Image: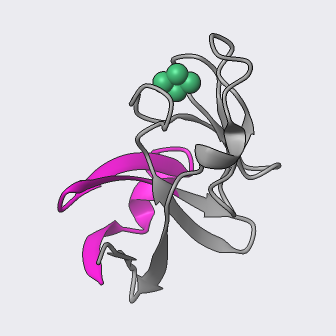
Amino acid sequence: MEKIVSVKALDKAGGHFAVKVGDETIFVARGKNGYHAMDAVCSHAKCILGQYDSDNMTVKCYCHDAKFDLSSGKMLEPPFVAPNAPKDKLSLRLFNVRDNEGFLEVDVD
Ligand code: FES
């Protein structure tokens, strides 16, 4: 587990942000039932995610609107420039994340 930032940073960032941890860039968000962490690099063309919908736990890519499920990492909607993209092959990796005495820790191993 790698300590990345105070949980208070999520308040200032509106409940989500992308952060570099080691070699990974990770999208971190506060959900209804805790914290979530997913690869922040879009599987389509490597843009950094994204627009967070906390009600539906989804993240939309700013570049071409691909939508990802933050709970599973699955691509829910393909990029508008590639409507036939194989969504099942374009999932993003999830990371374990936890609050350890006020600091978020992400497992990047
Ligand atoms: S780079 Fe994300 S949808 Fe194209």
Q: Quadrant of the C terminus?
A: bottom left
In this view, the residue farthest toward the left is 22
Rendered image quadrant of residue 77: top right
Q: Residue at x 69, y 47 (%)?
A: 88
Q: Is residue 75 left or right of residue 98?
A: right
In the rendered view, tell whether residue 26 sits above or below residue 84: below
- Percent coordinates x, y for residue 76 in the rendering: 76, 41
- What colour scheme has been applied to the protein in the rendered image? one colour
Between 42 and 4, the residue placed more toward the observer is: 42
Res 62 seen here: no
Rendered image quadrant of residue 108: bottom left
Q: Quadrant of the N terminus?
A: bottom left
State how many labels appear: 0
In this view, the residue farthest toward the top is 81
Q: Residue at x 51, y 54 (%)?
A: 11
In this view, the residue farthest toward the bottom is 101
In the rendered view, tell whether residue 57 sits above or below residue 35: above
In this view, the residue farthest toward the right is 56
Does residue 16 show up magenta in the picture? yes
- Percent coordinates x, y for residue 56 in the rendering: 82, 49
Res 87 seen here: yes
- Percent coordinates x, y for residue 99 in the rendering: 46, 82
Between 24 and 82, the residue placed more toward the observer is: 82
Does residue 53 show up magenta in the picture? no
- Percent coordinates x, y for residue 25 in the rendering: 31, 50
Magenta segment, which residues?
1-28
Q: Residue at x 66, y 27 (%)?
A: 85
In the rendered view, tell whether residue 35 sits above or below residue 78: below
Q: Is residue 35 left or right of residue 26?
A: right
Between 37 and 100, the residue placed more toward the observer is: 37
Q: Residue at x 43, y 63 (%)?
A: 8
